Amino acid sequence: MNKVALKMLFGDPTKCLGLVFGVAFASLLIMQQSSIFVGIMSRTSSIIYDAQEVNIWVMDPSVQYVDANRPMRDTELSRIRGADGVAWAAPFFKANTGVRSRTGNLQTAQIIGVDEATYIGAPRRMVLGSIDNLRCPDAIMIDRTGYKLLFPDTPLELGAEFEINDRRAVVAAIVENSAAFTSNITIYTTYSRAVAYTNNGRTQLSFVVARARAGLSPESVARAIEERTGLKARSSDEFRWDTIKYILANTGIPISFGAVVTLGVIVGVVVAGLTFNMFVAENIKQFAALKAIGVTNMTILRMVLVQAGVVGFIGYSLGLGIVARFFDTVPKHATGLRGFYLPWQVAAGMAALTVVIMLIASSLSLRRVMTVDPAVVFRG
Amino acid sequence: MTTDSPQGGAMTPPPAIAGSQPPAAIRCRGIVKEFGRGETLIRVLHGIDLDVRENEMTFIVGPSGCGKTTLISIIAGILSATAGAVDLFGTRVTSLKGSALVKFRRDNIGFIFQQFNLLPALSALENAAIPLIAQGASESVANAAARRFLIQLGLEKHLEKFPSQMSGGQQQRVAIARALVHEPRFIVCDEPTASLDAASGRAAIALLRDAAVRPGRAVIIVTHDSRIFDFADRMVAMSDGRIEKLSDAREIAAMEHH
Ligand SMILES: Nc1ncnc2c1ncn2[C@@H]1O[C@H](COP(=O)(O)OP(=O)(O)OP(=O)(O)O)[C@@H](O)[C@H]1O
Ligand SMILES: [Mg+2]
């Protein structure tokens, strides 16, 4: 009877399309928004991610996430280096600042200052030039997207000049980085130059980045640093989660994201549910006739579930295809979506959610079919 | 739709078989049916006793609202009786419940409805095959049987057509094929000709008579349609929830001539 169920479904193309559309729209909306949500969340900690060789971050005890700025005293660096299990430790400076291109184009940028000897914490995926170019006067590295924003319609090239807080800066290298949360331009330079650019004479040790000695877990070394210095130390993984949790707790992002997902579920349930109900209502006499003829309620249940399952599968696949295509093309061209992709967990979660949507959507009509009295077949 | 209705000897009424008394295939005793309760309680059937014979077409006639549909719904096991018993070829249908009842219907009863109730998305062949598919038969077995009956009913050119592409008479013949395909022992029809014009109605009943009436099987037709009365072997006249009169074919023929 499953084949009969499918024929009934596809025999009514309008309703079938309505059902598929409802599910496709819901899964499209939810997967797209969830992927963007995941993307935004990973952006909040992109600096931690990009500092690949670092696995411990040390900060002032009041700092809760990576964008908080509460400098430590410069002397902390040597105390951290002295802690048990620390292979090495380096200063890390981070601030937001204004930049102005030659054409007068003013924008905000994130400026990161790293240890002048080791460049620890700077991304190493070079697009143009070498990180050693930072030795030149006024030299900075900029990320590829930032370069495009600062110098629109200019091919990527080294030597371009602009101003950071009215001081001269020269592009000495261009790097690939992960997109950041607060700004679209990231500038990397030496620690002392970064401090000078931000026009601030006070101590500027935003973080100390460190690595645990081989064989030691970064978490345990972080605890050792905390004990020795009274500062806050986190493994990179811990710090990423701290940051994500902080953003979730302190911004409207999760609420608006949650609202969209809820909306998607509601749209899916309502559109698919109403259409399904209409479909079943129109076929109720036929279902009653099947029951009179001797089709059991179990079989009827299976028929409706097969119909729901097929609709759910087609709708979900359509949504998945569109979202996959979207993240395959759009982020390449839209800076706002740079690095965003469709995580498989989102796709898998949506598959499960589709099952839930179809169960809710069909439950109403299912009740109707299960309870319809076969005796109605003989009534006008 | 007379053009494609096969005409022939089947159109002539059956002769009365004087003397021979086939055994009762369906036995109803004291059937009472009440709807509602308390103030709104109405008694629709007032203790019906009825024997229906195999190898015959039994018509149930009577004014609208007298309880014909209610009676055959109870006999066919799609409505429960308030009191009384129905035996179908020795099985007490009124005692069956749940899936046992559904399976009994599936294996023993063929239904023909006024509104045909064919599945619009299925072809004539697929519609006629449904009872066998529901029994778990393979598609090829079910389709072969359905094809045989549809051809017998003169629908060889319409096997792949959908209900919407067929006339009412053709659709009712598909429904007849569906009612017969699993060789049930009891065929029940409620107003099978009410949606058809006179000629296709008569043609459908003639075909039904030819294909369905046989030893080991009983056929009940509920109808208002006096144009087909001459096909009856026996006629049960109901009035207000009671059986008023039982007539055999000879008496029916006499009524016609009257
Ligand atoms: N489910 C129900 N609830 C209440 N009353 C009902 C129900 N079904 C039938 N009746 C009543 O029972 C009586 C007999 O109905 P039934 O349909 O059996 O008559 P009928 O002889 O088939 O009539 P018709 O020739 O119009 O089809 C009618 O008065 C009807 O209103
Ligand atoms: Mg009736």
Image (cartoon, rainbow, N blue to C red):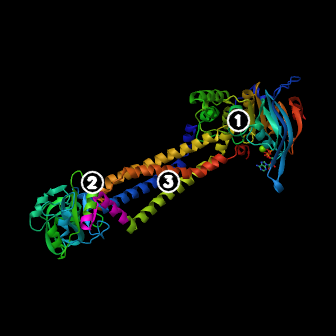
Q: Nearer the viewer, residue A294 or B162?
A: A294
Q: Mark 3 highlights which residue?
A: A22
Q: Which of B29 and A280 is in front in this view?
A: B29
For residue B1, say whether it is visible.
no
Q: Do labels 3 and 2 share a chain?
A: yes
Q: Mark 1 highlights which residue?
A: B105
Which of the 4 image quadrants contains residue B215? top right
Does residue A236 belong to the magenta stretch?
yes
Q: Does residue A110 lie above or below B246 as drawn? A: below
- Badge 3 density bin: few <14, some 14–19, many ≥20, Cα 10 Å: many
Q: What is the secondary structure assignment of the residue under circle 2?
A: loop
Which of the 4 image quadrants contains residue A42? bottom left
- Residue flagged by tag 1: what amino acid is it? Arg
What segment carries the magenta color?
A: A226-247
Q: Do labels 3 and 1 share a chain?
A: no
Output the chain of dot 1. Answer: B
Output the chain of dot 3. Answer: A
